[in-house]
Amino acid sequence: MSHEHGYDKQALGKRLRRIEGQVRGIERMVEDDRYCMDLLTQIAAVSKALESVALEVLDEHVKHCVAGALASGDERAAAEKSEELLAAVQRFARTR
């Protein structure tokens, strides 16, 4: 389990591969000329899954990267990580 950046690379990769499979499933649905509401349902599921991954990465960023910078006593690093966090939260809020 790698925590260089706070997240578990194996677990994150597994979740992203699962989402990738969902997207391929949507592509097959398009090829099979499936009903548009079925497509929209699956697209919404992929969006929700990606949002969940984003929240998990953000959570790990706070617990690992931001907390580490704050605990280090390095004011510059703490300010940098805090600004990154605020920017990430703003980006995430705009997509909702």
Image (cartoon, rainbow, N blue to C red):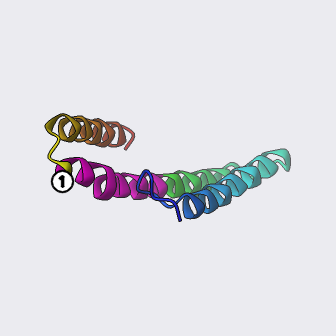
Tell me residue 24's x, y (percent).
75, 51
Q: Residue at the spot x=67%, y=51% of the render?
A: 39
Q: Residue at the spot x=85%, y=50% of the render?
A: 32
What amino acid does circle 1 point to?
Ala
Q: Nearer the viewer, residue 73 or 56?
A: 73
Q: Residue at the spot x=14%, y=46% of the render?
A: 73
Q: Nearer the viewer, residue 28 or 65?
A: 65
Q: Is residue 3 left or right of residue 37?
A: left
Tell me residue 36's x, y (percent).
68, 48
Residue 38 appearing in the image: no
Q: Nearer the viewer, residue 42 or 78?
A: 78
Q: Quadrant of residue 42?
A: bottom right
Quadrant in the picture for the C terminus: top left
Tell me residue 44's x, y (percent).
55, 53
Q: Is residue 28 left or right of residue 17?
A: right
Q: Give the class, few, some or many, for how many residues have Cα within 10 Å of label 1's Cα (few <14, many ≥20).
A: few
Q: Which residues are magenta?
A: 51-70
Tell me residue 7's x, y (percent).
45, 57
User: Which residue is the site of mark 1?
Assistant: 71
